[in-house]
Amino acid sequence: MWEKGVVTGSLKIYYCHAHQITNSLKMMAVGLSQIISTQIEVSRIEQLREMADRAELRALQSKINPHFLFNVLNAISSSIRVKPDTARQLIINLSRYLRYNLELNDEQIDIKKELYQIQDYIAIEQASFGSKLTVIYDIDEELSFTLPSLLIQPLVENAIVHGIQPCRGNGVVVIAIKAEGERIRVSDTGSGISEAVIEQVRRKELPSRRIGLLNVHQRVALLYGEDLHIRRREPGTEIWFYLTPGGRKQAA
């Protein structure tokens, strides 16, 4: 049996009598060994892909922007004297957010748990942005599906940090999760993603400071067989994907 051009094992077939070993049986043994060799290589590729997925998840977990931590700590310190209840709530939000990131693994989680983490993240960001940031949740009440960790939060972070923050005036982020077709959409009214960045993501090239967006794009394509849908709007950006194969047709 061969693997990448190297013999890595052998298939032995025993017969009680030599005259029973016909050419047809020899050809069958060769074909069987080729099938097993192919299965071994496919299995090895799958193992490597799973390892890469876990490595990407660990990289995403460890990617906590220092500016994000600085901003939330600054917001907490500013609120301690004048708004102690706000400061206390921000500490709770931050502790839950960090604990969630540290406890993640490559298992599927309930959509509601993912939403709790997103809500903590948004509460922290709103403490820094104030009235500049408005978040609208358009979420079906009856949601009962699972998904890999950190598929939605990086999209929300992308909308806030790269969409709302650079633009003047107030901005809106909409998080829409629909049971039909298991469709997830994050949109914003910010500065809008450039066509160059969209093309980089499609080519699986790392756009500047957008590791989260590329990570989600690659994982969605690998898990569900369809790339992220990214569209520049006037104003803002819209990103969506389906957890169900063929979900686009169901949703339509």
Image: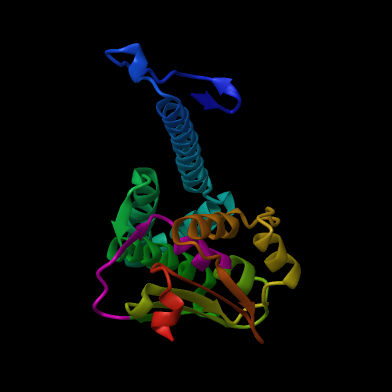
User: Foreground residue, 98 or 211?
Assistant: 211
The quarter of the picture where residue 182 lies is bottom left
Quarter holding the C terminus is bottom left
Residue lying farthest to the right in this orientation: 196
Identify the residue shown where x is 49% and y is 19%.
8
Is the residue 41 above or below the residue 60 in the image? above
Residue 64, image x, y percentages: 52, 49
Please say whether residue 72 is visible from this viewpoint: yes
Is the residue 135 above or below the residue 62 in the image? below
Left or right relative to 63: residue 118:
left
User: Foreground residue, 154 or 34?
Assistant: 34
Residue 25, image x, y percentages: 40, 27
What range is drawn magenta here? 140-158
Identify the residue shown where x is 50% and y is 34%.
41
Is the residue 53 above or below the residue 192 in the image? above
Identify the residue shown where x is 49% and y is 60%.
220
Residue 221, image x, y percentages: 52, 59
User: Foreground residue, 43 or 217?
Assistant: 43
The quarter of the picture where residue 233 lies is bottom right
User: Foreground residue, 71 or 122?
Assistant: 122
Residue 179, image x, y percentages: 32, 77
Report the label total: 0
Color scheme of the displayed model:
rainbow
Please say whether residue 82 is visible from this viewpoint: no
The quarter of the picture where residue 122 lies is bottom left
Let me know if residue 31 is in the magenta part: no
